[in-house]
Amino acid sequence: MEEMQTVIERDRSKIHSLNEKLHRTQQMLYDSTKDYLELKYEGRSQERVWMAEKDRLLQELDRCKEQLDVSKDDVLVISDHALEERQTQNLEIEDKTEKLAKRLHLMNQRYEAMEKRRNLEIEGFKNDTQILRNQLKDVEKQLYKVTVGVGEDGDMFMLHNIHQTAKRSKKMQSELHQLKALIYGVETDLRNL
C-alpha cells in the first residue's frame, strides 16, 4: 500500500511538472504567435503606407498632367523624380536593415560570451563542489580515525579534533553557500537578458 502511495505521489509530481512545462510551452507559443502576428500587422501597415504613398504620387502625377497639359518630357522628369524618391527610400531601408543586422550580430556575440561565461562559472562551481566534497571525506576519515584510535588520554585529543573538524565543516558550508549565491546571481543575470 505504501509503495502504491509512493508511486501515486511520484506520478502526481511528474504530472504537475509536465503540466507546468505544458503551460510554459503554451505561453511561449502564445508569445511567439503574438509576436508573429504583430510583425505581420506591422508589415501590412507599412505596405499600406507605401501603397498610399504610391497612390498619392500617381494622383499627383495625373493632376499635374491635367493642370499643365504636360508634355512627354515633363512626364519623364516627374517619373524620374518619383523613381529617385523610391530609390532614396530603398537606400534608407537598406541602410536600416544593415544597421539592424550589425546590431543583431553584436547581440548574438554578447549572448554567446555570456553563455560561455556562465558555463565556465558552472564548471568552476562543480570543481569547487568536488574539492569541498573531497575535503569533507578527508575530515570524515580523520574523525573516524580519531574515534577508533581513542585511548585513555584520547578524550581531550578527540574533543580537540572534533572541534577542529566542526570549524572546517562550517567553513566548507559557508563556501558552499557562497558558491550557490554566485550561481543564482549568474542565472538571474541570464534571465534578465
Image (cartoon, rainbow, N blue to C red):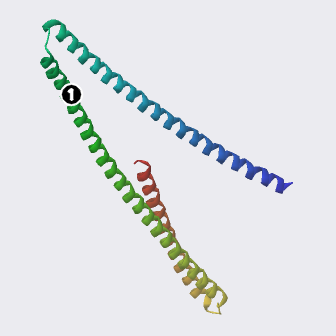
Q: Secondary structure at mark 1?
A: helix
Nearer the observer, 111 or 52: 52
Position of residue 158 in the picture relative to residue 179 (left or right): right
- All told, the count of numbered labels is 1
Other residues around mark 1 within 10 Å, as few (<14) / some (14–19) / many (≥20): few
- Percent position (x, y) of residue 8? 78, 50
Residue that appears at 55% across and 83% down: 161
Q: Is residue 180 above or below residue 89?
A: below
Q: Quadrant of residue 121?
A: bottom left
Position of residue 21 in the picture relative to residue 45 (left or right): right
Q: Quadrant of residue 29?
A: top right
Residue that appears at 38% across and 29% down: 43
Position of residue 19 in the picture relative to residue 95 (left or right): right
Task: Identify the image quadrant of the N terminus.
Answer: bottom right
Residue lying furthest front: 72
Residue lying furthest right: 1
Residue that appears at 60% across and 40% down: 23
Position of residue 157 in the picture relative to residue 38 (left or right): right
- Percent position (x, y) of residue 3? 83, 57
Residue lying furthest top: 67
Q: Quadrant of residue 87?
A: top left
Q: Which amino acid is tagged 1? A: Leu
Nearer the observer, 45 or 83: 83
- Percent position (x, y) of residue 19? 65, 43
Nearer the observer, 126 or 178: 126
- Percent position (x, y) of residue 188? 44, 52
Residue bearing mark 1: 83
Q: Is residue 70 above or below residue 34?
A: above
Q: Is residue 13 above or below residue 153?
A: above
Nearer the observer, 93 or 8: 93
